[in-house]
Image (spheres, rainbow, N blue to C red):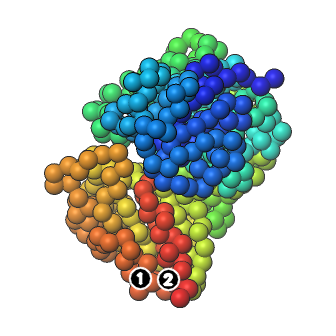
Amino acid sequence: MAPGIPAALERPHFIGIGGAGMSGIAKILAQRGAKVAGSDAKDSATAEALRALGATVHIGHAAGHLADDATSVVVSSAIRADNPELVRAAELGIPVVHRSDALASLMDGLRAVAVAGTHGKTTTTSMLAVALSELALDPSYAIGGDLEGPGTNATHGGGDIFVAEADESDRSFQKYDPQVAIVLNVELDHHANYASMDEIYESFETFVGKVVPGGTLVVAADQAGAVELTERVRGRSSLDVVTYGESETADVRVHKITPRGLTSEVTVVLNGKYLTFTVSVPGRHYALNAVAALAAGVALGIPAHNLASAIGKYTGVKRRLQLKGEAAGVQVIDSYAHHPTEMTADLEAMRGAASDARLLVVFQPHLFSRTKELGTEMGQALALADASLVLDIYPAREDPLPGVTSELIIDAAKAAGAEVTAVHDKAAVPAAVTGMAKPGDLVLTMGAGDVTDLGPQILDHLSS
């Protein structure tokens, strides 16, 4: 029987309905029968998909878009207080619901798996969602990216499992009560909300503390922050802790990761038995994401050999080393990486998958605060490429900071011996890449902003 719809979400209005997190919740509510409406800054395929489900989607933000009979206004932390629809909600006395509270309410009555960590959440959530779907368990899921297979970031399933990406950036993941929590890694990020690693650890401890009694924490055994978190929470009587990774002490131990071009073959030791399966994307970090998904599925009571086979059906998530196409003998691949650890992992993965190819990167820094704190490390990561073009900072929700520009990254990259060039006009990138690229090269568009739009443009320019 389908879960009900909370009264506050019977006629919700989403501000920023086209966003990855917001659209997923809106889709699930529409599929459950809610009368969904919302607005976004620009039209998109996501907006069209929502309309196909019966949602009303306005383009642009205006007070008049908010219906008087809306039961709530759903917002994310990115929505500013002066948004005209939010101001109108206050005038009408319509309750404002944070995205995380809406998602938490969708999980009520279901066995929830919440996937957290500084990196890898979207991929791991997707791998588990795909595997459970392949096993005909019909899960519900909410993911921060579109699956290549089902082609969506969220769905309402008829089964009793709900898999969700849990966002630590604004502490909203503390709202969930999962049966299984996955923590992939713990690093300092989101500098506008966290001042220190101690604050990060405290936030993750609160998240882990919300696991239901008798539930399971699946946590990385190799990453320093995750190990520290494990030491802080281990011993809580109601929590079963399962570690995974390449460490000899891991409960689910990675025996071997074998690159196979743009895929990997992974062998793990689980309960004393060897288990081998395929991961459809290259790189050690994606292989470890798959092992985390495997461990979580086992914690739900699903046989490991069934899960391993089903995880092999995962074909990727958009923007996670997604092949956009090939032209003039040059492959163009898109990466969402925007933190130095993610950048390094994706660049190393591409090096391992095509060791003879030249790797050219078009990088767009994301957020002024992140660039201020991690610009040096970003530049050092770019030294793994043969050559890079660095765009201006994508501001997203932030205002500029004095003295914080892409030059911080460029200077660090040059100091690390990288060949790097500043490009201030995005429109100039396709021609610049065409002038650099030769047959056999790989071009990686990288960043969390609108750099992803350049992939098709680069391919068109290469073809002309």
Q: How crowded is mark 2: few (under 14 residues within 10 Å), some or many (20 or more)?
A: some
Residue at x 54% of width, y 80% of height: 460
Is 178 on the left or on the right of 201, as rendered?
Answer: right
Image coordinates of residue 220 in percent, x first then y, are: 53, 37
Farthest residue, direction right = 136
Q: Residues within 10 Å of mark 1 (few under 14, many from 20)?
A: few
Residue at x 35% of width, y 45% of height: 397
Which of the numbered marks, if any, corresponds to residue 461? 2
Using the rendered view, name the quadrant where residue 245 is placed. top right
Q: Which of 147 and 22 is in front in this view?
A: 22
Which of the numbered marks, if any, corresponds to residue 431? 1
Residue at x 44% of width, y 54% of height: 448
**Kind of residue indicated by mark 2:** His
Q: Do the residues labelled 1 and 2 touch (CB within 8 Å)?
A: yes
Which of the numbered marks, if any, corresponds to residue 373? none
40 vs 426: above or below: above
Is 219 on the left or on the right of 170, as rendered?
Answer: right
